[in-house]
Image (cartoon, rainbow, N blue to C red):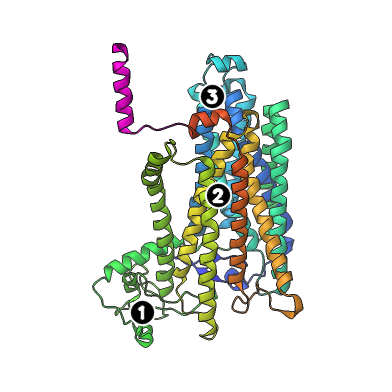
Amino acid sequence: MAAEVEMGGGEALLEEGTGGTGARRGGRKPLGWRCMPFIIATETFEKVGSVGVAANLTVYLVNRYNIGKLAAANITNIFYGTLNFAPLLGAFISDAYLGRFRTLAYGSFFSLLGMLGLTLSASVPALKPPGCSQTAQLGGHCNSPSTLQLSVLYISLAFLTIGGGAIRPCSLPFGVDQFDMTDEKSRKGLNSYYNWYYGTTTAALVFSMTILIYIQNSISWPIGFGIPTFFMLMSIIILFMGTRLYVHVPPEGSIFTGIAQVLVASFKKRRLKLPHPDNINQQELLLFSPPIGGHRIFRLPLTSQFRCLNKGAIVRDGDINDDGSARNSWELCSIQQIEEGSVISISLIALTAFLPIYDRILVPIARRFTRVESGITLLQRQGIGLVISPISMVVAGLVEHKRRNSALSNGGKSPMSVLWLAPQLILMGIAEAFNAVGQIEFYNKQFPEQMLTLAGSLFFVTLAGANYLSTALANITRKVTTRDGHTSWLTDDINLGKLDYYFYFIALIGVLNFFYFLICSHYYQYKSMSLHAEESIKVHTKEEAEAEVDANTDAPKK
């Protein structure tokens, strides 16, 4: 899908399969692969550095900070949770204020500071508690870390979180910015860039998860942290070496600002009357729809969903400048902003609402039937996600079938609202919530203690494998479906392809994967300690608890 959708304040959001154009950069020609050695090397060294420091964190806290295993696991989980959430804030800052290059640069420096802090904590005796034997640890006789030592640790982790939040959302898009999608050679180069990006990233993960962790566990923690710190320093140096070659897309606003403007403008004009939804001429006359500029290839059509928000686009006297722009973007919004705000609002509301529903309603209900403290077992959590995933693909196929028929009946442009995509995206998000959380918890609870470091890496390995499998499936599908002169299911013009068939194919793979999961689950035996600790904990009902109390009270009389 080659498309650019303008964000609330202006900057174009590059969707999958798109790159930049000269118009978006003030006419400067992107240099494509001339920039890639710097960008790919930067990302590779950064990945070695960040993963090499963070992957073995739990073991480091237990063995060098004398922190209990449960507390260490909690610290690690909080760190990773915050680290995975931070890119949302980093993306906002990049889009609204700094731009991708400066966000990458600042994030790299923060990551380097965090790594230096951890390296010092492992090297300087005053920054960590005295060593303690495993026997003393089990007996609880080890010295706990001091306030100063914990402060250095937490500040270092905070710097790593800030750095990761800045680097993760910007590294791949910054590389995409260096390709000109109006040039055929550059478009082919972009496809190679994706392959090289994921390939080198995976190689960095393998190096970090094997050699670096071996050095940390078996040779020296200072050396084990010092090596990734050096790689992070090299990452910064290489990033700045290519500065004169890069194309910089300036920050032009955040989509969240656009959403806020839609809500404010709609509220201010809540008493105005909207044109009839079927009267196109009246809509064009009364609603603000500025001409497409250099930042956009197409815009979203006006829809009837959340029509109250459409009032933000009603034009009143004095709302428009002489050049056709809005005089006050907090009082007049374009139709494009209305549609973007609606999509984001639905996704955020649905996904945000599901989390407390699951935790506060679904888990207690399941607990009454299963008598398991967590409501359902680890494998059941993953299984639910694997069931929802192919359903989302079926929904995606049905929506795409309807969209293509609509587009072919209307001269190649479908009048359907982009909100038709909401159901499948919500289902995908819910499936990921069940499966991903279940996987991470499964790996950490079911692996032997000496393999917890490996367990912490497996989830990211599965993500890398999924990327490669996705690429392979797309290439195989393209080759197979073009035999005998047929049109490929996956074409640049999706109206000519059969994207819905591909979605159904993915759904079939998901079904087969679920049955394979059932077979593996049937023969799997929970690790006894974890099974006792969670999976077989029985939750007594109120009546059973009272009966047990009565029995214990009557026991002496008998």
**Which residue position is annotated with label 3?**
67
**In the image, residue 250 lies at what x, y percent?**
55, 63
**In the image, residue 350 lies at what x, y percent?**
40, 57
**For residue 466, side relative to residue 141 (left or right):** right
Where 251 falls versus 420 (above or below)?
above
At horizontal 59% and vertical 73% (from top left) the residue drawn is: 23
Q: Which mark is residue 287?
A: 1
- Number of marks: 3
At horizontal 32% and vertical 82% (from top left) the residue drawn is: 276
Which of the two residues, 515 or 419, is positioned nearer the viewer here?
515
Mark 3 falls on what kind of element?
Answer: loop
At horizontal 60% and vertical 48% (from top left) the residue drawn is: 517
Q: Amino acid at mark 1?
A: Leu
The residue mark sitting in front, 1 or 3, is: 3
Q: Distance of mark 2 from mark 1, alpha carbons? A: 38 Å
Q: Amino acid at mark 2?
A: Ala
Q: Residues within 10 Å of mark 2 (few under 14, many from 20)?
A: many
**Which residue position is annotated with label 2?**
166
Asked whether residue 158 appears in the rendered view, the answer is no
Q: Residues within 10 Å of mark 3 (few under 14, many from 20)?
A: many
Where 542 falls versus 66 (above or below)?
below
**For residue 188, side relative to residue 348 (left or right):** right
